Image (tube, helix red, strand yellow):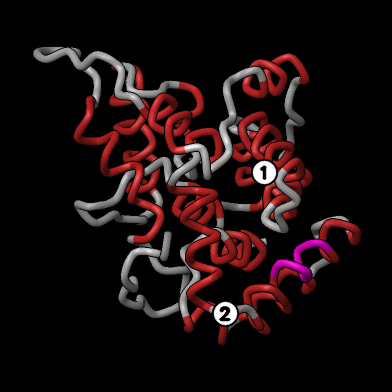
Amino acid sequence: MNKTFKALSALLTYPTAELQQASGEIGEAIDARGLIPSAIRRQLHTLLDELATGDLYDLQERYVLLFDRTRTLSLHMFEHVHGESRDRGQAMIDLKAQYENSNLFMSAAELPDFVPLFLEYLSMLPAPEACDTLGQPAHIFAAMAERLRKRQSSYEAVFRALVALAAAKPKETEVSALLTLPDPDASDLAALDAAWADEPVSFGPGAGDGCKDGLIARVRGALRPAPDIPAAHRPIPPRQ
């Protein structure tokens, strides 16, 4: 199962030439043990084909529009449940400690709730424990899958796969609550600015992680390479 989680982690990292070159290996890892339902595997291969054959600049621009500019598609799990509240800071600390207990160590620039990093962590756990842990944020992934479906994005398949692998299935009430949040199109700059508006920041003991971590979270997606794939420099910002 560790290869399955690593493959899904790779699919959610910022597209690079190295990721394109590894698409064949990623596809083999997805198919190897048949853990993911066949219909979802076919959808994953559609995404893989797009990543392998698409123009890299266009793929990177698509990634940024989806995951960096759209708050409801943020690849930071706690963004969906804590926002910029003080609870997020403690949740980050607890998750980081879980990683370190499994000998997964982060760089200073990384945040622990980044989904590809979380999937890397799951790849290091025994299969039953990994599937149990995956069940905790399954409602987040189900909501993201639905939002991506509405956008006709092939990335939907990654989140459908995560929900399928989770031991506990998401509650409809929790998914529906997330789907009631405003979900602006990435081309609507005013709506996006409103969605990303920082909540009030408090200082002192027990204060939340505030605007600094919020800013890091928004650019975090491009900082970590796919598992077992060398890092590549991120190109100039996508064309407008």
Residue at which label 1 appears: 131
Residue 186 lies in the magenta-colored region: no
Q: Residue at x 44, y 53 (%)?
A: 117
Structural crowding at the residue carrying mark 2, measured as other residues with C-alpha within 10 Å and reported as few (<14), some (14–19) or many (≥20): few
Q: Residue at x 38, y 36 (%)?
A: 95
The residue mark sitting in front, 1 or 2, is 2
Residue 10 found in image quarter? bottom right
Q: Quadrant of the N terminus?
A: bottom right
- Asked which secondary structure carries label 2, the reply is loop
Q: Amino acid at mark 2?
A: Asp
Q: Is residue 98 above or below residue 209?
A: below
Mark 1 → mark 2, Cα distance in angstroms: 35 Å
Q: Quadrant of the C terminus?
A: bottom left
Q: Amino acid at mark 1?
A: Cys
Identify the magenta region. 43-47
Mark 1 or mark 2: name the one nearer the start of the chain: 2
Q: Point out residue 53 in the picture as x, y percentages from the top left corner.
A: 66, 83
Circles 1 and 2: CB atoms closer than 8 Å: no
Horizontal arrangement in the rendering, residue 116 relative to residue 46 (left or right): left
